[in-house]
């Protein structure tokens, strides 16, 4: 049973436009949600997180939105840049454990 | 500051062989984790440790063992390698909530 779901395996976005990556979760007990970015042959890199008591967190070009009633979060990247091409993992944390989604591969088109 | 260091980066094992994946961190983090990532799948937790001498099972612990004799080291042991253990393994550590620091991964193939 997948507790964290990323239903889009891949996404292509024009450079300069907004990239929106989506994530759904099933367990209302999670208290943090996180996004990680992964380049080929490298470990995942922490990108941004949001506490379950907030609905928005912004860091530069990256904004994460949390909709608790829908058990849904999204990552917005504005404007999208070529270096943003990577796999993005959504993750949910409760206590000392983090559960990851399967990831969405983002392609930024020139 | 090296962060989280994993060795080896690549390894090919024959079925039934054993090996230890090494993980070391120099950030004095108490919490350490082992994940595996299969193609098209998310990261799945194998084992984790909240401090020296303390380990606990994650989602997929079968076929693996760990130890945590020091804060710095968290080795993952495969005793009888099976093709189902072909994967990329990531070690990670965390000091406080909000994000992990991951190693660069070990790509393991069991043939």
Image (cartoon, rainbow, N blue to C red):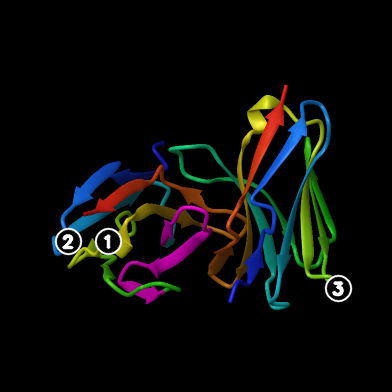
Residue at coordinates 21% horizontally, 48% vertically from top-left? B12
Residue B33 horizontal side relative to residue A3, left or right = left
Residue at coordinates 23% horizontally, 63% vertically from top-left? B77
Q: Is residue A43 above or below residue B76?
A: above
Residue beneath disc 3: A69
Quarter holding the N terminus of chain A?
Answer: bottom right
Q: CA distance from mark 2 to mark 1?
A: 7 Å
How many circles with numbers are drawn on the protein? 3
Q: Horizontal and vertical percent for residue B48?
A: 41, 68
Q: Horizontal and vertical percent for residue B20?
A: 21, 57
Q: Which residues are magenta?
A: B33-57
Residue at coordinates 24% horizontally, 64% vertically from top-left? B82
The reply to whether residue B20 is in sight is: yes
Q: Do badges 3 and 2 share one subunit?
A: no
Q: Is residue B62 above or below residue A99?
A: below
Q: Do badges 1 and 3 share one subunit?
A: no
Residue beneath disc 2: B15
What's the magenta bit mostly, secondary-structure-wise? strand
- Evaluate if marks 2 and 1 touch, with contact meaning CB atoms under 8 Å apart: yes
Q: Horizontal and vertical percent for residue B10?
A: 28, 42
Q: CA distance from mark 1 to mark 3?
A: 42 Å
């Amino acid at each position: 049973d997948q507790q964290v779901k990323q239903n889009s395996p891949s996404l292509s976005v024009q450079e300069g436009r907004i990239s929106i990556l989506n994530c759904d979760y099933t367990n209302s007990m999670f208290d943090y949600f996180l996004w990680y970015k992964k380049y080929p042959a490298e470990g995942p890199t922490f990108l941004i997180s949001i506490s379950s008591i907030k609905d928005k967190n912004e860091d530069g070009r990256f904004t994460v939105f949390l909709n608790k009633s829908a058990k849904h979060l999204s990552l917005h990247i504005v404007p999208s840049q070529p270096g943003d091409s990577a796999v993005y993992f959504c993750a949910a944390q409760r206590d000392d454990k983090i559960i990851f989604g399967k990831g969405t591969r983002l392609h930024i088109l020139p | 500051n090296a962060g989280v260091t994993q060795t080896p980066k690549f390894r090919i094992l024959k079925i039934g062989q054993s090996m230890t994946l090494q993980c070391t961190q120099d950030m004095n983090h108490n919490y350490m984790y082992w994940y595996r990532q299969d193609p098209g799948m998310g990261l799945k937790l194998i084992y984790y440790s909240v401090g020296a001498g303390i380990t606990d099972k994650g989602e997929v612990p079968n076929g693996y063992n760990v130890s945590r004799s020091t804060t710095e080291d968290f080795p993952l042991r495969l005793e009888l390698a099976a093709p189902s253990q072909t994967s990329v393994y990531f070690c990670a550590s965390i000091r406080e909530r909000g994000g992990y620091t991951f190693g660069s991964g070990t790509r393991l193939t069991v043939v």
